[in-house]
Amino acid sequence: MWWLIFKQEFVEMWAGGRVLNYLALYGVLMSITAYLLATNNQLNLLPLKQTVVVAVTSTITFGLFIGLVMGAESISGERERATLEPLLLTPSGHRQIVVGKFLAAMSPWPAAMIVSVPYVATLSQGDRVLWLALFWGAVMGTLSAIAFVGFGMLVSIWSDSSRTSLFVCLLVYAGLLIPAQLPTEFLNSRSGVLVSAIDPVQSSSRLLTKVLAEGRSLGEVWIYLVAPAVVTALIMGLLFAYSAPRLRLAATEE
């Protein structure tokens, strides 16, 4: 049943145009970002490898936004439209419903990564950093996407309306972008390293910078993988082990 739910949700998301609209906006944002990075590179304001890092980080940042929104609307939206009850009356079980919807909400991320390839390839100008950038971008992006979609669905399950779940998710998303605006001195301190390691967006940016731009080995940057992996595992545990079995039909229970 989870496979049938996934297919139904997948078709509704893509054929209905929701994901395509977000991807179109994503393409516009990536085009603007790539143009600005290429201009800075031509003026020698940014080294080539650093422009690639910024492009891949932008890919992750924009791509995660789409997954977060899809996850935030997945349960609370259907609850508002009274379309969740028929699913809960099937023999699929609550957890299988959540699994199907989770996989469907994850589907925009691979598409966003594919869309970004021409931009990253152009900015790399044939440098070997391209393949490292695509590999680490896919690894960190997928790890973060799982956490973001899972968090969005957690909020959606416990929210009375899609407006509430979207507001909470966007508030958290904005908060996770704040460390990138902090001074470099703070980010290089112990507190800054800890914040960067926990924040999925910032940890991806720091790992990409150190591996791609600075040529660091995995042994030197492992901290930026451990914390996001632990956070992702906790979110998945809360989503499927605790929240999914408690999925509600209506916004308020009598």
Image (cartoon, grey):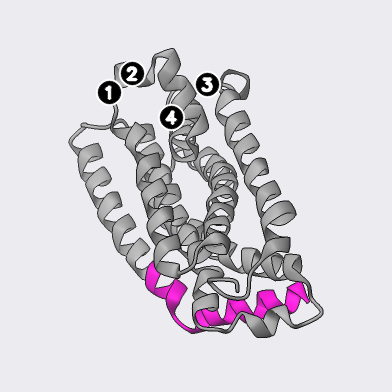
Task: Indicate the secondary structure of the residue bearing disc 3.
Answer: loop
- Mark earlier in primary sequence (4, 3): 4
Task: Compare marks 1 and 4 and give the one earlier in the sequence.
Answer: 1
Distance from Cα at disc 2 to Cα at disc 3: 21 Å
Q: Is residue 3 magenta?
A: yes
Q: Is residue 129 among what the camera can see?
A: yes
How many C-alpha atoms fall within 10 Å of the one at disc 1: few (<14), some, or many (≥20)?
few
Q: Nearer the viewer, mark 3 or mark 1?
A: 1
Q: Position of residue 212 (x, y in %)?
A: 47, 31
Please report whichever mark, 2 or 3, sits nearer to the chain's N-terminal start. Answer: 2
Which residue is labeled 2 in the image?
186
Callout 3, which amino acid?
A: Arg
Determine the CA span between mark 1 and mark 4: 16 Å
Check residue 209 in the rendering and tell me which mark sits there, or answer none. 4
Q: Nearer the viewer, mark 4 or mark 2?
A: 2
Residue 245 at what x, y percent from top left? 73, 62
30 shown above or below 38: below
Name the residue located 58 percent from the left edge and 56 percent from the top edge: 154
Q: Which residue is mark 1?
A: 183
In the rendered image of this protein, does residue 215 appear above or below residue 71? above
Circles 3 and 1: CB atoms closer than 8 Å: no
Q: Residue 66 appears in which quarter of the rendering?
A: bottom left
Quadrant (top left, top right, bottom left, bottom right) of the N terminus = bottom right
User: Between marks 3 and 1, how big is the CA–CA gap?
Assistant: 22 Å
Q: CA distance from mark 4 to mark 3?
A: 9 Å
What residue appears at the point 65 percent right and 65 percent down from the top-left corner? 103
Element type where label 4 sits in the image: helix
Find out whether residue 179 is within the magenta segment: no
Q: Answer whether labels 2 and 1 touch (C-beta < 8 Å).
A: yes
- Residue 240 sits in quarter: bottom right
